[in-house]
Image (cartoon, grey):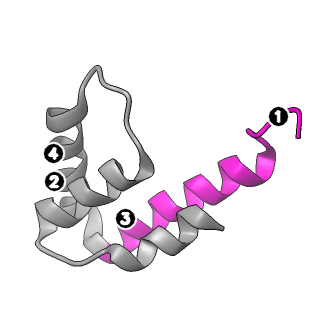
Amino acid sequence: MDNFYTVTVYNKGAEVVRMYNTLLGTEGFRKGMDLYFSRHDGCAVTCDDFRAAMADANGTDLSQFSRWYSQ
């Protein structure tokens, strides 16, 4: 594969972010984003870092989202 960053990858990423927002609500999503930036500003990160920030900020288990990242 010459280019990993295809339209499918970008669309899938946007859909996962939308699901976090829907599941956590606007306030919960914002809390997760604030924690994510606090922890990782200026750093290289992974999808798991984003998921962990969302989960930790909201006190919820989001481990089922790891399946989305591996497909």
Residue extending furthest toward the right = 1
When the figure is inspected, residue 24 is found, relative to residue 32, above or below; the finding is below
Amino acid under disc 4:
Leu
Task: Give the residue displayed 25% in from the left and 58% down from the top.
Answer: 52
Label 2, secondary structure: give it.
helix
Front one among 53 and 24: 53
Verify CB contact (< 8 Å) between mark 1 and mark 2: no
Name the residue that disc number 4 marks. 35
Name the residue that disc number 3 marks. 21
Task: Give the residue displayed 68% in from the left and 54% down from the top.
Answer: 11
Q: Residue 52 carries which label?
A: none
Name the residue that disc number 2 marks. 31
Name the residue that disc number 1 marks. 3
Label 4, secondary structure: give it.
helix
Displayed quadrant of residue 37: top left
CA neighbours of label 1 inside 10 A, class few (<14), some (14 to 19), many (20+) = few
Q: Which quarter shows the N terminus?
A: top right
Front one among 69 and 37: 69
> Main SS of the magenta segment?
helix
Amino acid under disc 1:
Asn
